[in-house]
Image: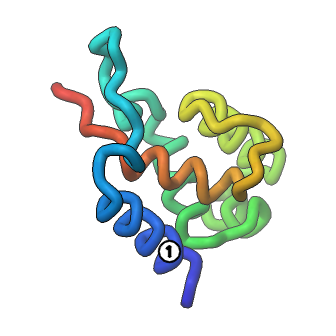
């Protein structure tokens, strides 16, 4: 099973468990998480979901590894992924993004 299959299975499991397993809607009516990330951050997160390392993402996007690390740090902050979480932070970020409602235009 590859990384994206694992994330998809986890996402489907959370949906099957119902609302208790899904993130709560934002009470302030702010747009969903999908509208929070920049196009480049979404691109990096897509490659994270495919299981690429920081170095492989850097090569693919013609960036330095440090730039990729910065983008990933911004993604974690914007998606409110806690530091030192017991889960893999990358998987946690992808799940939060997939579970977030679409931002309205």
The image position of residue 94, as x and y in percent, is: 52, 54
User: What colour scheme governs how the chains and residues are painted in the rendered image of this protein?
Assistant: rainbow
Q: Nearest the camera: 95 or 14? A: 14
The quadrant in which residue 13 appears is bottom left
Helix, strand or loop under label 1: helix
Q: Is residue 48 left or right of residue 7?
A: right
Q: Residue at x 39, y 52 (%)?
A: 98
Q: Is residue 53 left or right of residue 45?
A: right
Q: Residue at x 37, y 44 (%)?
A: 20
Q: Is residue 94 above or below residue 69?
A: below
Q: Is residue 67 left or right of residue 96?
A: right
Q: Is residue 48 above or below residue 78?
A: below
The image position of residue 58, as x and y in percent, is: 71, 59
Q: Residue at x 62, y 66 (%)?
A: 60
**Residue corresponding to mark 1:** 4
Q: In the displayed image of the protein, which residue is found farthest to the left?
A: 105
The image position of residue 51, as x and y in percent, is: 63, 72
- Quarter of the picture containing the C terminus is top left
Counting labels gives 1
Q: In the displayed image of the protein, which residue is found farthest to the top?
A: 28
Q: Residues within 10 Å of mark 1 (few under 14, many from 20)?
A: some
- Quarter of the picture containing the N terminus is bottom right
């Amino acid at each position: 099973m590859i990384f994206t299959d694992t994330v998809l299975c986890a996402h489907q499991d959370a949906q099957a468990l119902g609302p208790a397993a899904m993130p709560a809607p934002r009470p302030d009516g702010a747009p969903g998480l999908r509208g929070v990330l920049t196009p480049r951050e979404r691109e990096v997160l897509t490659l994270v979901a495919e299981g690429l390392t920081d170095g492989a993402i850097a090569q693919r996007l013609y960036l330095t590894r440090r730039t990729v690390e910065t983008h990933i740090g911004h993604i974690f902050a914007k998606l409110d992924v806690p530091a030192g979480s017991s889960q893999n932070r990358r998987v946690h970020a992808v799940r939060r993004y997939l579970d977030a409602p679409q931002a309205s235009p």
